[in-house]
Image (cartoon, coloured by chain):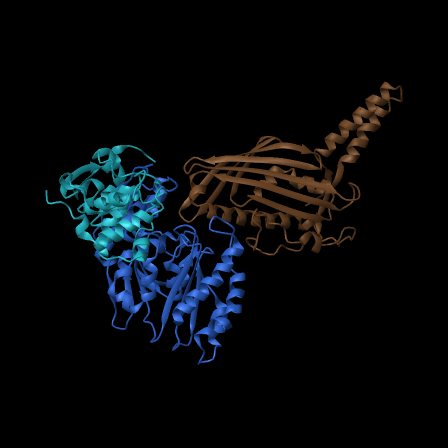
Amino acid sequence: MRPARFELHRPTSLREALALKAEHGDAAAFHAGGTELLVALKARVLQYDHLIDIKQIPELRSIRAKDDGTLVIGALSTHHAIANDPLVRKLLPGYAELSEQVANIRVRVAGTIGGVLCFAEPHADAPTLLCALDARLRLAGADGERIVASREFHLGEFTTARRDDELLVSIEVPPQLSGSRAAYRCFGQTERPAVGVAAVWSPAGSQRLSLWAGAISGVPTRLAQAEAAASRLPQAVSADEVWQRLEPAVTADASQLEAHDDLHGGAEYKRHLVTVLAQRAIEACLK
Amino acid sequence: MSTEAHEYPLMRVEMTLNEQAASVEIEPRDLLIDVLRDRLRLKGTKRSCDVQVCGACTVLVDGMPVSSCTTLCADVHGRSVTTIEGLAAGGKLDPVQRAFIAHGALQCGFCTPGMILAVKSLLAQHPDPSDETIRHYLRGNICRCTGYVKIIEAIQDLARNPSRYASETK
Amino acid sequence: MNFRIDAQLPATAAQLWAIFFDVQRIAGLIPGCENVTEVEPLKEYSALMKQRIGPFKLEVPTRIVVESSTLERNVALRATGRDKFTGTSIDVQLKVDLDSQAGPAAKDCKLALDAQMQVAGRLASLGYPVVKKRSEELFAEFEKRLRNELVQFDAAPAPQAAGPAPSAPAAGRATAPAAGAAGPQPGVKAPSQGSRSRTTLLWPRTGVSVAAGLLVALAAWAFGQSPWWWLVAPVLGVAAGIGRENA
């Protein structure tokens, strides 16, 4: 069915959008691609008197690199745009690859990275990799902007550190060290992942492996024992040996993950998937 | 929560629909599929799952597939929209349609309008797609009848032999 | 969804009954359950169940009915309600069984609590995994609060914050950690924790006992026994109704 009636606003600047939200408060929601919000409005499990369409605010859309190599992705960037952007493909091919396999072509064309992060449905792909990459999120509010680490942004299902009157402006990924590789692997019966694992392998870095599991729990979760085991690996270790040595730690991490039996699978099955996907993600980094 | 219509202003949406200018006055909450089917009487676009997963409602907006069941009509203001009716221009079938017929790539036909539009977009993005590319691009268009084999064969044949399905000059 | 609590407690059935038959007290232990009011004493109650998950809000006006009860043995409650806005309906059937071990006066009673819960409607269809997870969290919190209530019986040590049960079997049973067994063994009298107790008339036990006493008196009179039964029997009934109630 149709959503309940609302008024649609089309601000052309960030300031205007924030002012509209301040004016209408809880009765207003920001609207971008609508791939999640509209489903909820149509089902009438959410209702707003005002929708603030932010798609015509220019500062939310660009993808660019800063001088120091930081990749700045506008919150309105669609998965399709990210997957095909030359900068992303050059600096973060693992993230371009992730964006290309989100859901289906229609969701990739309409859905934005900002929407995925702010709606905070746990069965999503990008948040897991962005946490592994230690991305920073820039939020704009009435009293200015602030940066929140992606690792601190996700607080629970449908719950983030964004205050209701703030707008996510951009996602900033720190420059990757030379030789770093990032990969994300997921599995699910539906279009949403039951479990996803993101790996960032940085042979030149002090932390060799960043390994995060997503979709299985309410928020992306660090696989800390695996990361610690990776830091203890000898400097010269063959690709084959890496997984052999990390597997017990990954399995130990997986066994401690919060998981529930549900339509995406049983809790034990999901924990098993974490180990399988971790192997695939790590081996993709080492190839 | 008031339901007084006057508190929620109507909007005028102007778009290019099947290469012609179209203008409709709508409520902001109106979904694109309903405006196309009920207001503009273009019944080729089908509603099936209504939660944007099946692809039956696919239309092209600026050449790319969207789920019209989960798109506000207001969001296509100033853009170009293509429905299945826009393909058989002047009564001549589109090459994709010809290839589908030649290969028997449809049975009940319910998924077909959405599928064909997705294929149009696929071939515009990838003129010579691999099997893997075809399957990946069409992942969100579900067909319950054909088992997809004929659909993929039709696409591969069309991509490799475009002249076979080129529109007749008459 | 199915939830269970199984425990063996160093308390009499009567003491546990006082808690479980007190619908307002039990409902008050459920997180999000507000405004528990009596509609018909010992028969029907109303409450408002409020939950929030991110932007999704649920407010379910709930009707709680005591479907059946056997004094100090079992009680079955049914709670039903519907949130008009999201079309979410809730149906919970709660059964509590008290099984005295070694006689009713012995401070040794098995408690079996079984909850069958159904959540239906648009929100549940769209987001069943989250609904299920939240239900499990609510029940785990309810169990924690209940065990705090039962601490007065020197029952299990303060419950671990186990959170959602890991590797819960497919039926979603949140079985109690083996706290009943880990706690004081039956027959071992744990030292009092110093909770104050007062002597009072326990209801409905007193009423039942007095009624029984009057019946005995009637029978005695009918059989030509001394009319003094009319005085003695009800007094004995009142005496039977006196018990300790822990503060």
- Residue A12 in the figure: left or right of residue A269: left
- Most extreme residue toward the left is B170
User: Which chain is the one coloured blue?
Assistant: A
- Most extreme residue toward the right is C225
- Residue C61 in the figure: left or right of residue B26: right
- Residue C199 in the figure: left or right of residue B161: right
Q: Residue at x 55, y 36 (%)?
A: C79
> Can I make out residue A230 in this image?
yes
User: Which chain is the one coloured cyan?
Assistant: B
Q: Nearer the viewer, residue C33 or A31?
A: A31
Q: Residue at x 28, y 32 (%)?
A: B4
> Can I make out residue A166 in this image?
no
**Hue of chain C?**
brown
Q: Quadrant of residue C17?
A: top right
x and y, in percent, of residue A200 in the image: 39, 69
A187 versus A248 height, above or below: above
x and y, in percent, of residue C83 in the image: 45, 37
x and y, in percent, of residue A138 in the image: 31, 61
